């Protein structure tokens, strides 16, 4: 395509607790209660007038850490690949994010929001008020997800037909997570975000069969490995391992200390 570039410029930036792609919730609904800020350019002081009072806002952002476009992707709820425009995958022709967030308050040109599902530092392109009678269409058909379409609730908001997987952390893994947490490595929020949503093995999720336990799986989170079992909709995390080989650990003191202390 040889069209001239569009004059799109960031108007602000997201401030959230998520610094890595692996940490971010897969959908806004999975981010309920997660608070953050949208810091808009000070020149927009007049532009945000009258926004305070709306309960929710649409946030359009540029996913600046998405590196590839994939025409077909394998979404968590599908057994086959789907056209990317029929999914919510970030690997889009233009990596534009569309998120609905609860607007807590407005202070100057800073929007305090809840339900943040974007990485810290993500450029914001636009903010629009969410208007229920024009934006909510609860009985709209959902394409290849139609088989999962639920009945409406009393408030006409459909519940997630799949729901979350139940994640249980066994005592051994709990002690290992506590040891790592005391040294500044917080893995539990990330592993729960991933495993509660979709714990099935897929290469892009970095979930593989466990070579050390028949029927088990391993989730890679940075340089750590989370060993778990999956039965129906129950996930049991039983061990946290170093991702480094024994010959590599001398160059990584934290991992060497971890294995010496906890034997994993």
Image (tube, rainbow, N blue to C red):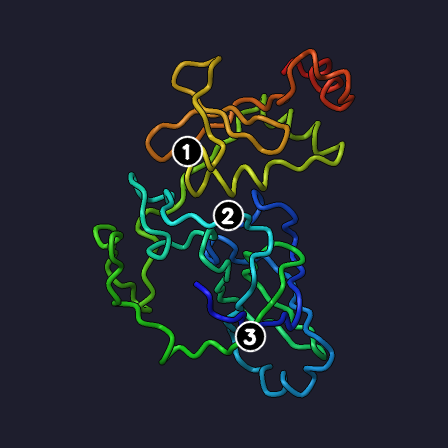
- Image quadrant in which the C terminus is located: top right
Residue positioned 55% across, 27% down in the render: 226
Which one is earlier in the sequence, the residue at label 2 or at label 3?
2
Q: Earlier in the sequence, mark 3 or mark 1?
A: 3
Instruction: Label 2, secondary structure: give it.
Output: loop
Q: Secondary structure at mark 3?
A: strand
x, y percentage for residue 48?
Answer: 63, 83
- Residue at left offset 25%, top offset 51%: 148
Front tag of 1 and 2: 2
Based on the displayed image, in which of its 4 quarters is residue 178 positioned?
top right
Q: Mark 1 falls on what kind of element?
A: loop
Position of residue 234 in the picture relative to residue 154 (left or right): right
- How far apart marks 3 and 1 lie (CA) works out to 34 Å
Q: Observer-nearest residue: 47 or 217? A: 47
Q: Determine the residue positioned at 25% across, 67% down.
A: 139
* Front tag of 2 and 3: 2
Residue corresponding to mark 2: 68
| Quarter of the rendering containing residue 151 | bottom left
- Counting residues from the start of the chain, the first of labels 1 and 2 encountered is 2
Label 3 Cα neighbours within 10 Å, binned few <14 / some 14-19 / many ≥20: many
Query: Residue 14: which numbered mark, if any?
Result: none
Report the side of 183 relative to 231 (left or right): right
Q: CA distance from mark 1 to mark 2?
A: 17 Å
Q: Relative to 172, is 85 on the left or the right?
A: left
How many C-alpha atoms fall within 10 Å of the one at disc 1: few (<14), some, or many (≥20)? some
Crowding at mark 2 (Cα within 10 Å: few <14, some 14-19, many 20+):
few
Question: In the depicted view, which residue is nearer to us: 67 or 40?
Answer: 67
Tag of residue 202? 1
Residue 127, numbered circle: 3
> Residue extending furthest left?
147
Q: Residue at x 70, y 77 (%)?
A: 109
**Above-or-below relation of 63 to 225:** below
């Amino acid at each position: 395509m040889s069209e001239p570039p569009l004059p799109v410029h960031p108007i602000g930036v997201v401030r959230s607790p998520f610094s890595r792609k692996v940490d971010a919730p897969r959908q806004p609904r999975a981010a309920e209660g997660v608070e953050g800020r949208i810091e808009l350019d000070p020149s927009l002081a007049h532009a945000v007038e009258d926004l305070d009072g709306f309960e929710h806002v649409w946030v359009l952002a540029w996913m600046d850490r998405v590196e590839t476009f994939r025409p077909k992707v394998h979404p968590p709820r599908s057994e086959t690949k789907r056209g990317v425009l029929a999914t919510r995958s970030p690997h889009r022709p233009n990596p534009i994010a569309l998120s609905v967030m609860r607007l807590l308050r407005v202070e100057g040109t800073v929007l305090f929001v809840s339900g943040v599902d974007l990485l810290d530092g993500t450029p914001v392109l636009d903010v629009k008020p969410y208007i229920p009678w024009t934006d909510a269409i609860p009985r709209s058909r959902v394409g290849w997800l139609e088989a999962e379409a639920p009945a409406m609730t009393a408030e006409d908001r459909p519940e997630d037909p799949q729901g979350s997987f139940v994640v249980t952390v066994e005592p051994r893994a709990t002690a290992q997570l506590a040891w790592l947490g005391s040294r500044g490595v917080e893995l539990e929020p990330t592993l729960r975000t991933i495993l509660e949503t979709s714990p099935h093995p897929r290469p892009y999720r970095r979930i593989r069969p466990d070579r050390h336990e028949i029927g088990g799986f391993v989730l890679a989170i940075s340089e750590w490995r989370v060993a778990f079992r999956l039965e129906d909709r129950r996930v049991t995390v039983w061990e946290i391992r170093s991702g480094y080989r024994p010959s590599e650990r001398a160059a990584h003191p934290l991992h060497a200390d971890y294995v010496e202390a906890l034997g994993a």
